[in-house]
Amino acid sequence: MLLPRLHIVTDSLDVVRGVLGHGPVAVQVRVKTSDRDAYALTTAALELCRAAGAVCLVDDRVGVALAAGADGVHVGAEDLPVAAARRVLGPAAVLGATCRNPEAARAAVAAGATYLGVGPAFATRTKTGLPEPIGPPGVAAVTRAVPGTPVIAIAGITPDRVAELECYGVAAISAVAADPSGATADFLRALASRSDRVGTAAPGGRA
């Protein structure tokens, strides 16, 4: 499985419908209420993703991902440790890990991460309590620290900012909420027109 360069993080099935059909994307289901709600949305999103040939991941909830049959999970700093998540998921699943510096990036890859979600790249209001943005230089430092591992920049990403980032791909949240279809097309064009840089030729998931 080649990991898509555009990740869409959402808790809306309407957004999932809107982002599919324009090119390769990974949909990351992020639900902050209950496992039951997360499972219901994941199974619905997975059906749409399968039909469109898209990757479907679950944010935080390893059990939900396994129960629904999703392609993998993204774990954050407060979630199950990467090594533990890998043991539970097995070797074939896509496993993303959040980090913000080269040391954490190398540790996550050593523990079994398939790709890294790196940031916050820019300031954002989508999620409260985030540390200060690391900016394009911070994203580039992580990319260079883990050659061969896809680095996905997250937080405050817009199509106009894609060209500033030295990394494999980007994750979008609020930038696609108002117009999922149009924004996804804009992101894919920006990624396609950007010159290949360090990390852009990295392989994707292990499935």
Image (cartoon, rainbow, N blue to C red):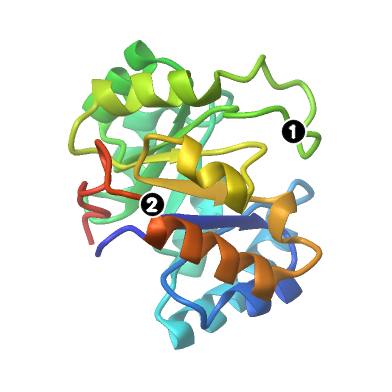
Considering depth in this image, is 128 or 183 the residue closer to the camera?
183
C-alpha distance separating marks 1 and 2: 23 Å
Q: Secondary structure at mark 1?
A: loop
Q: Position of residue 53 (x, y in %)?
A: 40, 80
When the figure is inspected, residue 117 is found, relative to residue 123, above or below; the finding is below
Considering depth in this image, is 188 or 105 the residue closer to the camera?
188
Q: Are marks 1 and 2 in contact (CB under 8 Å)?
A: no
**First-in-chain label (1 vs 2):** 1
For this orientation, the residue located farthest to the top is 103
Residue placed under numbered mark 2 in the picture:
194
Considering depth in this image, is 13 or 136 the residue closer to the camera?
136
Seen at 40% across and 59% down, the residue is: 193
Considering depth in this image, is 183 or 148 the residue closer to the camera?
183
**Can the viewer see residue 186 in this picture?**
yes
**Amino acid type shown at disc 1:** Thr
Seen at 55% across and 60% down, the residue is: 187
Q: Position of residue 83 (x, y in %)?
A: 32, 29
Image-quadrant location for residue 9: bottom right
**Can the viewer see residue 26 in this picture?**
no
Indicate left or right for 76 with 102 as reference. right
Q: Secondary structure at mark 2?
A: loop
Seen at 79% across and 49% down, the residue is: 33
When the figure is inspected, residue 104 is found, relative to residue 69, above or below; the finding is above
**Amino acid type shown at disc 2:** Arg
Quarter of the image for the N terminus: give it.
Answer: bottom left
Image-quadrant location for residue 192: bottom left
Residue placed under numbered mark 1 in the picture:
124
Observer-side mark, 1 or 2, equals 2
Seen at 67% across and 72% down, the residue is: 182
Image-quadrant location for residue 147: top left
